[in-house]
Every structure is written in structure tokens, then in C-alpha cells.
Image (spheres, rainbow, N blue to C red):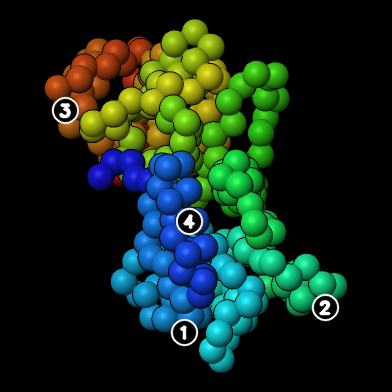
């Protein structure tokens, strides 16, 4: 798939709560990889289906509680964690902070609380990447969340992830830009130059004032055009030499 729902693992030993959280996540457009009651079972599942984010109840039964599990997810798998808790005493909170969670959700919580916590987490994930510094962003511009190998964008009322390798090209449209994959397109309310400054230079190259291409998706090149599948994109004379040098190194 060229774009995927963000994958969420729920570790919650109260199955009624786990089912409710799963329902909220599905309604928000996320993919639930599992509702697991114990930390040990959650670790076993990681080898089969690694999530993008984990929602963990702090008070879990078994040898590992949610805090111990979060430390493993953070240190060994680099999976961001959001804690779900009905216990807010100082001792538990201070222990939980050591696991470096991205957010806390106090039970009971509403769907909007969950949505905001997840979007905050995605934003923090992006901000930890060296390439995500915003350069002169104007008021009203959309902020895509860009990581090392993917971009998170809003599609209608949900966030989706697009792997860089699956992007075909990007087209400028006044103060907007469109990202094209093999099956879909996404409209971002930001100038293409703002997005270009954050893209990995190893993959993307501007070929025209209105187009950036993924070098690995280029099928053919002639004097004045670049072909990606059946799409012909204009190739500027001023950018042709640089583009030809780049395409030889891919």
C-alpha cells in the first residue's frame, strides 16, 4: 500500500476499556494491531506486527507493568508510548516519567482527548527528527509531520502515513501542493518550497518550478520531460543538468 493508517497497539487488561479504546481508534481512522492484556504478550506480538505507537495501561497484571513495558518499547524498539491510567499519585507519575512517554491519558477519557494525544505524539515524533525544523512557516500553513522515512499528513479528518519511497511526485498549486502516490493524491495547505526544505535530498529532486519527483520512481527521461508511469512532467532547461547528474546516482 502506498499509504497506511497509523498502527496502534493497545495494552489494557480491562477488556471493556480496551474494546472502547479500539472503537475510538477505528473511528479516528487508525489501525489497531491488537488489544493485549499483558506486557509479556505485547512483546511477543512486536515481531509479527510492529506498531507506530503504543497505548499502555500503567497498572497491568503479570511480572511487567505498563511502565516496565514502556521502557522496553522506548529503549529497544523506539516505539512512542501514551500511558492510560486511573492512578495519578506522585510515586506512580514519577516512575512513569522515567519511561519517557509522549502523553498521559487519565481514565475515563473522551474520543477527542485520545485524538489530541495521538496527534501530539505524532508531532513530537516528527520534532525529534533532525530534518523537521520548520523554516519560516507562515500563519495558516499546514504542518506535515516528517520523519526519517515517512510523512504524516491529514486526509479529511484523520492522519495517515505515506512512506517517502511510495511518493511519485509533488506538484505546486499556488500556495498549495499536492502529493501523488500510485493510487491517491493529498492536498497540503503549504507552499511546495516549505515542504521541499524538509524532504530527504537523497530521494527527491526539483525538475520544474511546479514539480518535485522521487528519483527512484522515474521511468524515462527525454529532452523536455520526465516520465513516471504514464504521467509526463515538464523538465526545465535550467534544472536538467542537475537532474541528470542525480538520476545517474540512484
Mark nearer the N terminus (1 vs 4):
4
Proximity of marks 1 and 4: CB atoms separated by less than 8 Å: no
- Is residue 119 among what the camera can see? no
- Label 2: which residue? 91
Question: Which is more foreground, mark 1 or mark 4?
Answer: 4
122 left or right of 208 in image:
right
Question: Which is more foreground, mark 3 or mark 4?
Answer: 4
Per the model, the C-alpha gap separating discs 3 and 1 is 46 Å
Image position of 1 with respect to 63: above or below: above
- Label 1: which residue? 40
**Picture quadrant of residue 163:** top left
Mark nearer the N terminus (4 vs 2):
4
Per the model, the C-alpha gap separating discs 2 and 3 is 58 Å
Instruction: Report crowding for label 2: few under 14, some 14 to 19, many 20 or more residues within 10 A (C-alpha).
Output: few
Per the model, the C-alpha gap separating discs 4 and 2 is 28 Å
Give the farthest residue toward the left. Answer: 230
- Label 3: which residue? 229
Q: Residue at x 59, y 31 (%)?
A: 143
Instruction: Report crowding for label 1: few under 14, some 14 to 19, many 20 or more residues within 10 A (C-alpha).
Output: some
Image position of 96 with respect to 164: above or below: below
Of the 4 image quadrants, the one containing the N terminus is top left
- Label 4: which residue? 20
Amino acid at each position: 500500500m502506498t499509504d497506511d493508517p497509523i498502527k496502534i497497539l493497545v495494552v489494557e487488561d480491562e477488556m471493556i476499556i480496551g474494546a472502547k479504546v479500539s472503537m475510538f481508534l477505528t473511528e479516528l481512522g487508525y489501525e489497531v494491531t491488537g488489544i493485549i492484556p499483558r506486557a509479556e504478550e505485547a512483546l511477543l506480538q512486536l515481531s509479527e506486527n510492529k506498531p507506530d505507537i503504543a497505548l499502555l495501561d500503567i497498572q497491568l497484571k503479570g511480572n511487567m507493568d505498563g511502565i516496565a513495558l514502556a521502557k522496553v518499547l522506548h529503549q529497544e524498539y523506539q516505539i512512542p508510548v501514551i500511558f492510560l491510567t486511573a492512578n495519578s499519585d506522585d510515586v506512580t507519575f514519577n516512575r512513569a516519567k522515567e519511561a519517557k512517554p509522549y502523553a498521559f491519558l487519565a481514565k475515563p477519557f473522551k474520543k477527542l482527548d485520545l485524538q489530541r494525544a495521538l496527534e501530539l505524539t505524532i508531532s513530537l515524533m516528527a520534532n525529534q527528527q533532525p530534518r523537521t525544523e520548520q523554516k519560516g512557516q507562515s500563519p495558516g500553513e499546514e504542518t506535515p509531520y516528517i520523519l526519517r522515512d515517512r510523512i504524516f499528513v491529514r486526509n479529511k479528518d484523520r492522519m495517515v502515513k505515506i512512506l517517502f519511497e511510495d511518493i511519485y511526485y509533488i506538484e505546486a498549486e499556488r500556495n498549495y501542493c499536492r502529493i501523488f502516490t500510485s493510487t491517491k493524491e493529498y492536498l497540503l495547505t503549504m507552499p511546495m518550497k516549505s515542504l521541499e526544505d524538509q524532504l530527504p535530498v537523497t530521494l527527491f529532486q526539483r525538475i520544474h518550478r511546479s514539480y518535485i519527483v522521487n528519483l527512484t520512481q522515474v521511468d524515462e527521461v527525454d529532452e523536455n520531460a520526465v516520465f513516471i508511469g504514464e504521467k509526463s512532467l515538464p523538465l526545465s532547461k535550467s534544472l536538467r543538468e542537475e537532474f541528470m547528474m542525480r538520476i545517474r546516482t540512484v
